[in-house]
């Protein structure tokens, strides 16, 4: 049986591909959730992995939920509503909690449609770059449901409350240029340049001291909900850890000696 999620490491960069192209890479499948969880947690535990690129096989990034599995008694939707709640908690809702917990940076390379939970998956990542072939929609209302995977929390933090509300209540589809204009993605490139662009960003991240990168990401994530006072306290604590690394000394020495630093993660 084909793996639902593939991973390939090249140096310090791990590329993760959702591999259900015939179904347009839905993420509601248990196999996808479990394999993503296993791969990403392993990457997070390995300081040698400096960045992760997430993409989809075939023509789509992710179609979100599998509509064929949304009939009563099938997939997440159980005959008993109380069980449906448990299915969401034990299924797709594991993903936003997983991504929020990661310290390794994740770059979404959106190669095609990112629809419903597929758009939310992109929002779970730290950086998003899009192919000109990409289209997006927070389309849950179009099929009579709500964002059950955290989209109501994720999207407003990226594009702002007003725009997120417009997108979620209309369910409209928009293209990559519109996504760039609203700040959903940071770059739009030709389809053939997508993975190379994502790799360029990943390499720039990987060139920095890994502990400082991961702690910076943690501060940014915590800053989404924490007070300024709490972030300042956390920043001071993490700064004391950063100062204690050899990479901090190496960065200062390399700057003073006008040479390229060599970071080891120590």
Image: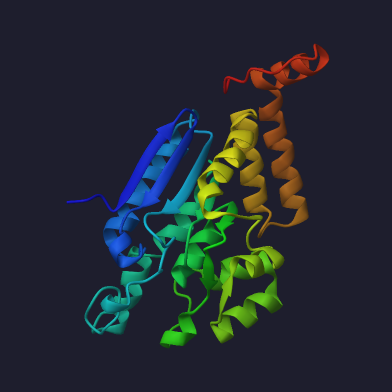
Residue 233 versus residue 113 in the image, above or below? above
Asked whether residue 173 appears in the rendered view, the answer is yes
Q: Position of residue 39 (x, y in %)?
A: 37, 43
Q: Position of residue 172 (x, y in %)?
A: 56, 81
* Depth check, front residue: 40 or 131: 131
Q: Residue furthest right?
A: 256
Q: Position of residue 11 (x, y in %)?
A: 47, 27
Residue 49 versus residue 228 in the image, above or below? above
Residue 64's image quarter? bottom left
Question: Which residue is at 58% across, 69% downward?
Answer: 153
Question: Which residue is at 30% across, 66% downward?
Answer: 23
Residue 236 versus residue 155 in the image, above or below? above
Asked whether residue 105 appears in the rendered view, the answer is no
Q: Residue furthest left?
A: 1
Residue 45 versus residue 91 in the image, above or below? above
Q: Position of residue 19 (x, y in %)?
A: 32, 54
* Depth check, front residue: 256 or 180: 180
Q: Quadrant of the C terminus?
A: top right
The color scheme shown is rainbow
Question: Which residue is at 71% across, 25% downward?
Answer: 243
Q: How many marks?
A: 0
Residue 40's image quarter? top left
Question: Which residue is at 45% across, 69% downward?
Answer: 117
Q: Residue furthest top?
A: 257
* Depth check, front residue: 96 or 241: 96
For residue 186, side relative to residue 142 (left or right): right
């Amino acid at each position: 049986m084909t793996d639902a999620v593939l991973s390939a490491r090249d140096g310090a960069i791990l590329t993760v591909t959702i591999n259900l192209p015939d179904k347009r890479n839905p993420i509601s499948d248990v196999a996808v959730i479990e394999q993503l969880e296993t791969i990403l947690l392993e990457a997070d535990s390995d300081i040698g992995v400096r960045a992760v690129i997430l993409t989809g096989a075939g023509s789509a990034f992710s179609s979100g939920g599998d509509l064929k599995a949304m009939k009563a008694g099938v997939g997440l939707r159980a005959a008993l509503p109380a069980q449906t709640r448990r299915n969401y908690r034990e299924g797709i809702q594991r993903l936003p909690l997983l991504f929020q917990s990661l310290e390794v940076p994740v770059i979404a390379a959106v190669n095609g449609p990112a629809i419903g939970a597929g758009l939310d998956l992109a929002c779970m990542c730290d950086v998003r770059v899009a192919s000109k072939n990409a289209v997006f929609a927070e389309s849950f209302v179009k099929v009579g449901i709500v964002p059950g995977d955290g989209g109501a929390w994720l999207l407003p933090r990226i594009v702002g409350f007003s725009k997120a509300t417009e997108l979620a209540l209309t369910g409209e589809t928009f293209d990559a240029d519109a996504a760039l204009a609203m700040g959903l993605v940071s770059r739009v490139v030709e389809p053939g340049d997508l993975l190379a662009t994502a790799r360029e960003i990943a390499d720039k991240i990987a060139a920095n001291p890994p502990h400082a990168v991961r702690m910076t990401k943690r501060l940014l994530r915590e800053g989404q909900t924490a007070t300024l006072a709490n972030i300042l306290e956390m920043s001071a604590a993490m700064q004391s850890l950063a100062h204690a690394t050899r990479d901090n000394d190496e960065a200062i020495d390399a700057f003073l000696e006008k040479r390229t630093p060599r970071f080891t993660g120590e």
